[in-house]
């Protein structure tokens, strides 16, 4: 058991890398768990000890992402939206920065499968819930926590989409800063008209 | 065939109502298509002529929602975020206003099933894509269209969650106005510090 525990982290990383390679080479549907284990020099049993299913090999980084985000939210001393943006800056620098090629491959695999897209959406949803909970734990009200988290997630998604696009060489952190500024401009533009602003021509 | 075509709209509404009733009474998993058809006084064949599967009986309103949103975006003369908020006001008034009890029941059914939650998320995603496309069709740039749509969707979701909560009697339209104002406050608060604002204490 000691040996097993010692080797798990390595086995996990090897299986994840093998899964990414094979999904990329053969397609997600065409890849079997046995193939992934074989490519990693491990057996199927080891795979299932670490991952619930084939899809999980692509999503287990979500836990690290969540941990970094939640810790950054807890440790950042700023207004709620700024705190969320700072947390995304942190994951951009700690997790994504040096892995653009890998992330691009992973992204193209996810986009190839509706099943993976659904899993991705659900993971994103639970990540947002964790960030909002971390804000509430600091005493931020529920509505503000939700709005700051969702707005931060919008900024991150827009920045991320640009960052993985072919030919982009801007850093993810800079794109986050840029998109946060654009989101502020887009949402505050409409504040101008009047207190009763959200009711232009077409409102019944 | 003429008779069938004439009866389809009625059959659709009857099947949707029957599905909602049965999912509510027995649970989504426990309800069969045959039961839904029988409750509506129709047969299984008619059900499958109108819906791809059991889940669809709960989501076919999405098309109407999309049509109203897209039309409202096209017809509203305002800044992008304001346009999206105006479009959500319109669906609040035209589609949701008089149906809070039905919507509450539907929402509790969706929350009871991960399968329905996934379908709901995907439908929301395609709705957002349609709204962003409607903004781009008016000449709005891609990034602005995405940020305005996602921010509007954040406002709508926050307003909707309050509106369906037990005991709430505020109107959905008023909650949208309120949440739009809160989103502006939450995102613009962080604009204060400096141009380099999105990089507080924890940024690497």
Image: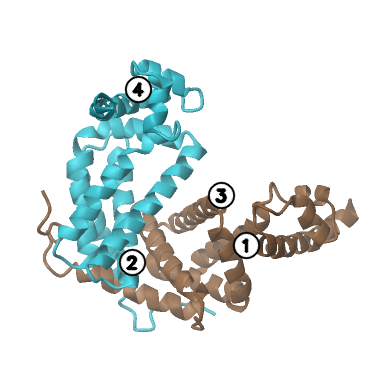
Chain colours: A cyan, B brown
User: Which dot marks residue A18?
Assistant: 4
Disc 4 + disc 1, Cβ < 8 Å: no
Q: Which residue is mark 2?
A: A147
Among numbered discs 4 and 2, the one appearing first in the sequence = 4
Have a look at marks 4 and 2 and say if they share a chain: yes
Where does the image place residue B58, in percent across and percent down from the top left?
A: 64, 58
| Chain where mark 4 sits | A
In terms of image quadrants, where is residue A79? bottom left
The answer to which of A19 and A9 lies nearer the viewer is: A9
Among numbered discs 3 and 1, the one appearing first in the sequence = 1
Q: Residue at x 83, y 55 (%)?
A: B5
User: Which dot marks residue B115?
Assistant: 3
Where does the image place residue B126, in percent across and percent down from the top left?
A: 51, 52
In this rendering, the answer to whether B173 lies above or below A110 is below
Q: Which residue is mark 1?
A: B64
In this rendering, the answer to whether A179 lies above or below B167 is above
The answer to which of B13 and A36 lies nearer the viewer is: A36
Observer-side mark, 3 or 1, equals 3
Left or right relative to B1: residue A159: left
In terms of image quadrants, where is residue A194? bottom left
Observer-side mark, 4 or 1, equals 4
| Chain where mark 2 sits | A
Residue reaching furthest to the front? A1
């Amino acid at each position: 058991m000691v040996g097993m525990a010692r080797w798990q982290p390595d086995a996990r990383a090897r299986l994840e890398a093998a899964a990414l390679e094979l999904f990329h080479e053969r397609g997600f549907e065409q890849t079997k768990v046995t193939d992934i284990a074989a490519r990693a020099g491990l057996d199927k049993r080891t795979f299932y000890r670490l991952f619930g299913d084939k899809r999980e090999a692509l999503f287990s980084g979500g836990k690290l992402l969540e941990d970094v985000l939640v810790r950054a939210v807890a440790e950042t001393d700023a207004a709620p939206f700024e705190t969320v943006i700072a947390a995304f800056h942190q994951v951009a620098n700690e997790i994504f920065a040096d892995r653009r090629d890998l992330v691009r491959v992973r992204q193209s695999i996810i986009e190839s499968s509706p099943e993976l897209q659904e899993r991705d959406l659900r993971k994103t949803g639970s990540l947002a819930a964790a960030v909002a909970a971390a804000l509430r734990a600091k005493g931020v009200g529920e509505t503000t926590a939700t709005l700051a988290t969702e707005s931060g997630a919008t900024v991150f998604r827009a920045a991320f989409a640009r960052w993985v696009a072919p030919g982009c060489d801007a850093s993810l952190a800079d794109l986050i800063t840029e998109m946060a500024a654009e989101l502020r401009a887009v949402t505050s533009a409409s504040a101008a008209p009047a207190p009763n602003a959200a009711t232009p021509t077409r409102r019944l």
